[in-house]
Image (tube, rainbow, N blue to C red):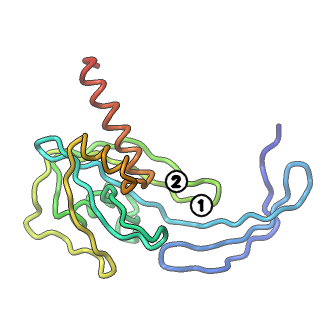
Amino acid sequence: MEFYEETIKSTSIYKGNVTEYIVEDVKLPNGEMSQREIVRHDGAAAVIPYTKSGDLVLVKQYRKAIDQISIELPAGLKDDSDHDGLETAKRELEEETGYNAKKWKFITSFYSTPGFTDEFLEIYEAEDLYFAANPLSLDEDETVEVITATYEEAWDYYRQGVLRDSKTVFALYYWKMKKLEMELGE
C-alpha cells in the first residue's frame, strides 16, 4: 500500500519564536488533492530528575494553551546555543529547578504529536542531584514552582488531573516499569 503524500505547494502562514505554521497542498496516494496544516518546531528535551531519597522533582506552572496549572517534568526548547538534547536537558533542569546532576542517562525520544507537528522530544534521566552554586535564571516569561513528589504523590497528581502532560505521564510509567524491574531483579 502506498502512503507517501507529495507536497505540491507549501505556504508559511506564521513564523514565531517557537513555531512556524505551514499549510501544504498535497497529492494523496490515490491522486486526490488535500491540505495539511503543520506546525514546525525545533524540538525539546525533558528531564526525569530523582532526588537522593528517590523522589521526583517536578515543576508546577500555568499553561495558557490549556488554561490550567500543570505539573510537569522540567523541560524546554532546544535553542541556537544547544541543539543537543542533553545540553538542553541540563540547561532546563538548572534553570527551572536550581539543580544539576552528576549522572545522566538518555531514555528515549519521540515525536510529540506527528499528526500535525514535527516536534521531536528527547527524554533524559538525572540522578545524584545537587544544587547549582549559581543557577541559571528562568526565562523572563516563566513562573514555576519546584515540587518534589514521592511515587505515590506523583500518581495522585495524575489521578487528580493536574498531571496530564504527555512527557510527564510517560515518566510516571517509566518510573513504574523501573520499580517493577527492581522488584523482579532485572
Q: Position of residue 116 (x, y in %)?
A: 64, 60
Residue at the location (36% across, 57% down)? Answer: 162
Q: Is residue 153 above or below residue 10?
A: above
Instruction: Determine crowd level at label 1: few under 14, some 14-19, many 20+ residues with C-alpha closer than 10 A.
Output: some
Mark number displayed over residue 117: 1
Q: Secondary structure at mark 1?
A: loop
Viewer-nearest residue: 14 or 88: 14
Amino acid carrying mark 2 in the image: Ser
**Residue 108 x, y percent position in the rendering:** 41, 42
Labelled pair 1, 2 in contact (Cβ < 8 Å): yes
* Residue 119 vertical position relative to residue 64 in the rendered view, above or below: above
Which image quadrant for residue 20? bottom right
Is residue 133 placed above or below 179 in the rendered structure? Answer: below
- Residue at (45% x, 54% y) in the render: 121
- Whether residue 183 sits left or right of residue 25 in the image: it is left
Quadrant of the rendering where the C terminus is positioned: top left
